[in-house]
Amino acid sequence: MISKKLHDAINEQINAELWSAYLYLSMSLDAEDKGLKGVANWFFIQFREEQDHARIFMNYLNSQGAKVVLKPIAKVDTKWKTPLDMFKKTLEHEKVVTSLIHNLAVIAHEDMDFASINRLNWFVDEQVEEEENARELIDSFEMAGDNKYGIYQLDKELATRVYKVPSPLATAE
Ligand code: MG
């Protein structure tokens, strides 16, 4: 059993994860439009991962006998000037998501809800990784600056990213 407060907050979080998915899909499409296939690939994988995050929360609510209620997805930007701008926005957004996850963890602790604390711990770790990835890519694109060859090389590197099923879903299969 989870509290009504945590149940409502996780429903909000499902919306936030799906909004993240929509944001990264938009970045992927904008990168594709700019001929940056590697950047497009990176964000498309990010789009899939965010849907997975939503799914993990949905599975969790279902497992607790708590109903998932979907809410409208707010609109997202559709254009960025450079890949650097995309990764800066990504970091800024992931920091917001981190604080949302931490708020959920605070509620779970207040409730002394140990199952929810365990589930949320996975997300706490995941957010460290998300922020670190964005920070590394900001550094790389800052180093490349306006150098077209540098951007081309980075784009090629990002084309190699492959999608992996996150562990909470992999074990559920
Ligand atoms: Mg997420």
Image (cartoon, grey):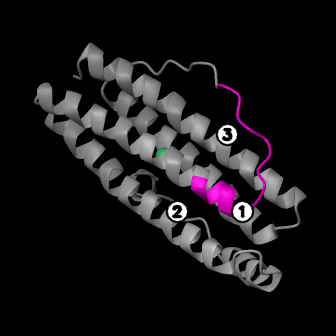
Q: Residue at image x 52%, y 38%? A: 17
Q: Check if residue 11 falls in the magenta segment.
A: no
Observer-side mark, 3 or 2, equals 2
Dot 3 or dot 1: first in sequence order is 3
Query: On the image, numbered disc 2 is attached to which residue?
Result: 134
Q: Residue at image x 51%, y 48%? A: 92
Residue 63 percent coordinates (x, y): 34, 31
Query: On the image, numbered disc 1 is attached to which residue?
Result: 83
Amino acid type for the residue under numbered disc 2 = Ala
Q: Answer whether labels 1 and 2 touch (C-beta < 8 Å).
A: no
Q: Secondary structure at mark 2?
A: helix
Range shown magenta: 74-88
Q: Is residue 64 visible from the viewing direction of this image? A: yes
Query: On the image, numbered disc 3 is attached to which residue?
Result: 22
Q: Quadrant of residue 38?
A: bottom right
Residue 12 percent coordinates (x, y): 45, 24
Q: Main secondary structure of the magenta part?
A: loop
Amino acid type for the residue under numbered disc 1 = Pro
Q: CA distance from mark 3 to mark 2?
A: 17 Å
Q: Quadrant of residue 128?
A: bottom left
Q: Residue at image x 71%, y 28%? A: 75
Q: Secondary structure at mark 1?
A: helix
- Left or right? Give the position of 14 relative to 24: left
Q: Quadrant of residue 108?
A: top left
Q: Compared with residue 52, is residue 157 higher up or lower down, i.e. above or below? A: below
Q: Secondary structure at mark 3?
A: helix
Q: Residue at image x 29%, y 32%? A: 104
Q: CA distance from mark 3 to mark 1?
A: 17 Å
- Left or right? Give the position of 74 relative to 155: left
Amino acid type for the residue under numbered disc 3 = Tyr
Q: Is mark 1 within 8 Å of ligand 1?
A: no
Q: Is residue 66 visible from the viewing direction of this image? A: no
